[in-house]
């Protein structure tokens, strides 16, 4: 028996030294207590103890493997694949999901086991001509801001929804716009600050292509008006565009204005900032004379009071992607603290290239995630995304759904977010198109903009006619970044979970508990609702349902 104990001690020490399973130190403590009673009881044979040891180790290892769990909602008979929905979040003890079914509007509540608690119909909302709905969740209620058209007027309305899914108080009319046409596109755009203390509703009148009129309403967390502004934005060139609007915790709005000729590279760019109580924009031109930019992405760093701008850059017009462009603006000093470019190394290109050659390694990549760190550093996540078709080849200048910068010629108003997920078609198109989403490249940078580490999550995803089941979503649990996406194994799409530690180490987690072959996950539309919970929409046969993932 002492020989068995010695072997077990070796096994446990090796596993613990390798840091394979965090829960094993507790097992080590318990095991030493148990072994004291064994001593040298020779009457127990090795055959008797071996099953007990295996059971003990299996139970401990399983407690770690099964730390991630999935539970599913039962699909309602009305929740067809053509249903529009929005995951609101965890409000009070339950999870709330908004559903639009045949011009009827519901808020459905689910408990922690994703059992339906109740379904509340909101009959005050219009039966038709509903254009868009946005939700801003808090701990015990949420705000619903919706817009709809009645005759030649678009109304922007707000309602407060309590933890039971019911409307509280009166409906608020935030604004109206008179238009001379019928539209399904958003007129109003809505944003909230990271701490949810500020909400802004704005619209852009683009009838005069040289002179946009920007109208905004800044609200506090009680939807009380703090500032209403009406500002003229000169648009000097016909190919000038606005994009990437963000609101910081102080109520300041930041976005970009740039020149892009016929969906070409960006040759000139300016960032614009409107302070909360100001009726004008402060502007700063980016220094990109010696390079060309792709899409400019913005991240508000509220902790360090900074604005972070980044883009892929090119040394030649419509050339190969050469690296990243960075620009960081400090609010306290009212000046830039960094403006530089980082060129991709040959080693990183080899890791990221997939089927492309080294020079073209990043030509299909798009920036998906920007995560700022407290020390001023940041993490960028990008993904290879492209389509193939019998009729034509797609490139990043053609844009998958038409140019996101093309202002409709007959529209009086322009919303920078008119191609939203909530109202976007999720059904098969008439064209024969195959969508691809491949490797994910993650890079960590210091506050000086130097690469600290880089890593690649390898994947190959494709689907025909739709991109619902490809690409990934990111969940930040504080100690790790989780990348969730489908991978096809034996003709079945299984949800995979890869984690990245703060030092850049990648681990593939074991298959999540309760994966069911009947469910197809739309990971790209998932939403993190608490620090360690995520709601993922799923297709189940001809229905839409929702899965909750717990990271215990």
Image: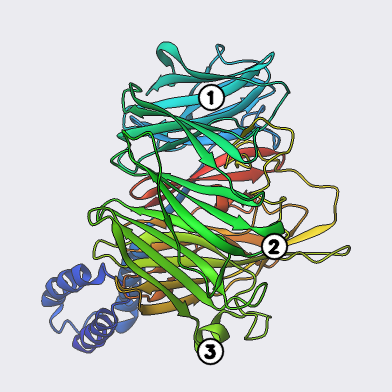
For residue 281, above or below residue 214: below
Q: Position of residue 503 (x, y in %)?
A: 32, 75
Q: Is residue 177 above or below residue 200?
A: above
Percent position of residue 168, x then y = 39, 14
Disc nearer the start of the sequence (2/3): 3
Left or right relative to 58: residue 510: right
| Residue 74 visible in image | no
Q: Residue at x 76, y 64 (%)?
A: 394
Helix, strand or loop under label 1? strand
Looking at marks 2 and 1 on the same chain, the residue that comes earlier in the sequence is marked by 1
Residue 83 or residue 358, whichever sits in front: 358
Instruction: Give the left or right position of residue 12, taking residue 460 as reference.
Output: left
The answer for how far apart the CA atoms under marks 3 and 1 are is 49 Å
Mark 2 or 1, which is nearer the eye? 2
Viewer-proximal residue among 484 and 400? 400
Label 3 Cα crowd, 10 Å radius (few <14 / some 14-19 / many 20+): few
Q: Read off the residue under disc 2.
A: 397
Identify the element where label 3 is drawn: helix
User: Which residue lies at the image location 44% right of the left edge and 55% below the top edge?
Assistant: 298
The answer to whether one can see residue 267 in this image is yes
Tell me, for residue 146, which label it has, or none.
1
Which residue is the site of mark 3?
346
């Amino acid at each position: 028996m002492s020989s068995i104990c010695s072997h077990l001690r070796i096994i446990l020490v090796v596993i613990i030294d390798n840091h394979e399973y965090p829960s094993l130190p507790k097992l080590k403590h318990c095991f030493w207590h148990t072994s004291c009673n064994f001593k040298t009881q020779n009457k127990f044979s090795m055959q008797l103890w071996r099953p007990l040891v295996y059971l003990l180790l299996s139970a401990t290892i399983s407690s770690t493997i099964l730390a991630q769990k999935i539970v599913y909602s039962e699909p309602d008979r009305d929740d067809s694949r053509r249903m529009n929905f929005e995951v609101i979040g965890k409000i009070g003890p339950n999870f709330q999901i908004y559903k639009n079914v045949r011009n009827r509007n519901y808020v459905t509540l689910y408990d922690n086991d994703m059992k339906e608690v109740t379904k509340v119909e909101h009959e005050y909302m219009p039966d038709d001509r509903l254009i868009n709905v946005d939700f801003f969740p808090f701990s015990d209620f949420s705000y619903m801001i919706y817009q709809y058209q009645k005759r030649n007027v678009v109304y922007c309305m707000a309602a407060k929804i309590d933890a039971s899914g019911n409307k509280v108080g009166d409906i608020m009319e935030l604004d109206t716009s008179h238009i001379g046409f019928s539209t399904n596109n958003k007129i109003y755009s809505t944003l909230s600050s990271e701490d949810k203390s500020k909400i802004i509703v704005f619209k852009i009148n683009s009838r005069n292509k040289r002179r946009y009129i920007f109208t905004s309403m800044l609200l506090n967390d009680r939807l009380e008006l703090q500032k209403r502004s009406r500002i003229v934005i000169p648009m000097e060139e016909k190919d000038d565009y606005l994009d990437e609007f963000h609101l910081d915790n102080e109520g300041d709005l930041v976005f970009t204005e740039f020149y892009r000729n016929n969906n070409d590279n960006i040759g000139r760019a300016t960032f614009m900032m409107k302070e909360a109580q100001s009726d004008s924009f402060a502007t700063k031109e980016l220094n990109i004379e010696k390079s060309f930019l792709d899409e400019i992405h913005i991240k508000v760093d509220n902790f360090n009071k900074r604005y972070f701008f980044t883009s892929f850059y090119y040394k030649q017009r419509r050339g190969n992607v050469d690296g990243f462009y960075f620009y960081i603006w400090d609010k306290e000093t009212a000046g830039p603290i960094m403006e530089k470019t980082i060129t991709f190394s040959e080693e990183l290109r080899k890791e990221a290239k997939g089927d492309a050659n080294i020079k073209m390694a990043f030509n299909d990549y798009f920036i998906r995630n920007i995560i700022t760190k407290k020390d001023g550093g940041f993490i960028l996540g990008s993904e290879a995304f492209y389509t193939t078709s019998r009729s034509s080849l797609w490139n990043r200048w053609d844009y998958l759904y038409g140019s996101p910068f093309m202002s409709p010629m007959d529209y009086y108003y322009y919303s920078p977010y008119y191609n939203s997920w909530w109202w976007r078609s999720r059904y098969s198109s008439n064209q024969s198109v195959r969508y691809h989403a491949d490797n994910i490249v993650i890079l960590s940078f210091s506050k000086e903009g130097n690469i600290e580490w880089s890593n690649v999550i390898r994947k190959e995803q494709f689907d025909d006619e739709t991109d619902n089941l490809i690409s990934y979503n990111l969940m930040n649990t504080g100690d790790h970044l989780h990348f969730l996406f489908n991978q096809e194994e034996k003709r079945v799409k299984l949800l995979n979970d890869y984690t990245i530690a703060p030092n850049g180490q990648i681990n593939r987690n074991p298959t999540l508990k309760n994966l069911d072959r009947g469910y197809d996950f739309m990971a790209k539309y998932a939403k993190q609702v608490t620090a360690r919970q995520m709601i993922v929409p799923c297709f189940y046969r001809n229905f839409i349902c929702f899965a909750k993932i717990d990271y215990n």
